[in-house]
Amino acid sequence: MSLKRKVAVLGATGAVGQRFIQLLQGHPWFQIEVLAASERSAGKKYKDACPWLMETELPKEIAEMPIVNADVASVEQAGEVDLVFSSLPGDLAGSVEEQFGALYPVFSKASAHRMDKDVPLIIPEINPDHAEMVKIQQKQRGWKGFITTDPNCSTIQLAITLKPLMQFGLKQIMVSTMQALSGAGYPGVPSLDIIDNVVPFISGEEEKMEAEALKILGNYNGYTVQNAEFQLSASCNRVNVKDGHLESVFIKLEQDPTIEEIEEVFAKFQGEPQKLKLPSAPVNPIVVRHENSRPQPRFDRDAGCGMSVVVGRIRKDPIMTFKYMCLGHNTIRGAAGGGILSAELYVSKGLA
Ligand code: NAP
C-alpha cells in the first residue's frame, strides 16, 4: 500500500497554515499540491499574500505557488489532491469542511465539527481507536471522504498528560492556562493589549477545554463516543509569550500514588504512533523535568521537535491529590504537527 498523498492546505496563510507548510517540507508521505485561503489572498503568489512568520526560510517552491479560494471547485482546478488539512477560522470551517468532507479525508484544526457525534476528536497517542468512527460518518452522511478533528491546542497537551493518570482513577481536574500569542492567530492580540500585561479571558477557550477532554478520553462503543466521567474546570489567560502554552494543573485521583509513581507513568507513556513509528511521532510524548524552574515556554516548547509535552513541578497538593505544570507547543503539537500526526495515523491504518 502506497503511503504517499498529495495534500491541500486550507487557511495556508495563517499562523497554523504556515506551520503546516513548514512541517510538511520533506515529509516522507505528504506533498503539498494546493494552497487555499480567503478571497483577499486568492490569485496572489504565496510570498505576496502573507508575512512568513516561521524561523526557517520560506521554501522557494511554496513562495511561488498561487493561492486559490478555499472551495472544492477552486482546489480541484488547481491540482489533484488526496487529502485536505484545514486551518480555517472556526466560524467558516463548518460548511467549507463539509463540502470537502463529502469527497476527501479532511483533517481539521477548527472547532466547528469537534463535538459532532459522528466526528472523531483525535490525539493519536490517546484514542486511535476513535478514528474508526469515520466509517460510521461516511455511511450516515453518504460521503466518499470524511471529517476528523484535532482538539483545541490547550486541550491537547493537557489530555496527553491525563491519559496515563487514568489508571489511578481520575476524579477532578482544575487547570489554569498561560497561553501564547500565536494561539490567537495572526496578527492576533493588539500589542497595546498585551505588552506589560496578562489578559484573563480567551473567548470560548474554557468551554472547549471542559468539553473536549471528556470526549477524547471517552470510550468509542463502535457507534459513537461515551464521554469520560471526570470533572474538569478550566481558567484561561493570554500571556506575552510568542509560542508555547503553560498550564498549572491540579488533580484529584481515586488512588494516592507516590510522586515517583506519577513521574514513572508520565515518562513511560507511549501510544500507537510510537509503536507504528509514524514519521511525526516523538519518541517520548511526555518529557518529565525535575528542575524547580521548568518547564518554561522558551526552553521547553521545542522538546521532541515541538511534539512532546513537558511536565514538571510534580508535587503533592493539600486539597487535591497532586499538582504539576505542563507545557506544549501550541502551533506544533497543538495544531499543525498534531494534524499531520493524525493524518499519518489514518493513512497507516488504511482509513485515508
Ligand atoms: P489565522 O492566523 O487568523 O489564519 C486564518 C486563515 O484562514 C488564513 O489563511 C486566512 O486567509 C484564512 N481565512 C480567513 N477568512 C477566510 C475566508 N473567508 N475564506 C477562506 N479562508 C479564510 O488563524 P490560525 O491561528 O492559523 O487558526 C486557524 C484555525 O486553527 C482556527 O480555527 C483556530 O481556532 C485553529 N487553531 C489555532 C491554533 C493556534 O495555535 N493558532 C491552535 C489550534 C487550532 P487570509 O490570509 O487570506 O485572510
Image (tube, rainbow, N blue to C red):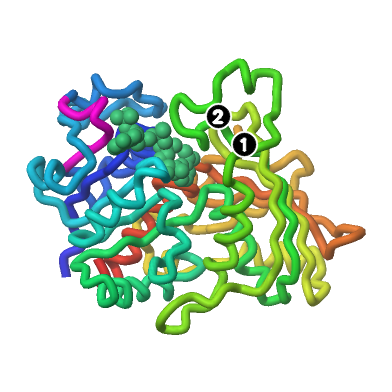
Identify residue type, mark 2: Lys
* Ligand 1 shown in quarter: top left
Identify residue type, mark 1: Pro
Residues at discs 1 and 2 in contact (Cβ within 8 Å) = yes
* Residue 331 visible to the viewer: no
Q: Residue furthest top?
A: 192
**322 with respect to 113 (left or right):** right
Q: Which residue is mark 1?
A: 297
Q: Quadrant of residue 165?
A: bottom right
Q: Position of residue 112 (x, y in %)?
A: 42, 53
- Secondary structure under badge 1? helix
Give the quarter of the figure containing the C terminus.
Answer: bottom left
Determine the residue positioned at 25% across, 59% down.
Answer: 101
- Range shown magenta: 34-43
Give the quarter of the figure containing the N terminus.
Answer: bottom left
Task: Reply yes or no: does residue 39 show up in magenta.
Answer: yes
Determine the residue positioned at 59% across, 57% down.
Answer: 286
Q: Which residue is mark 2?
A: 242
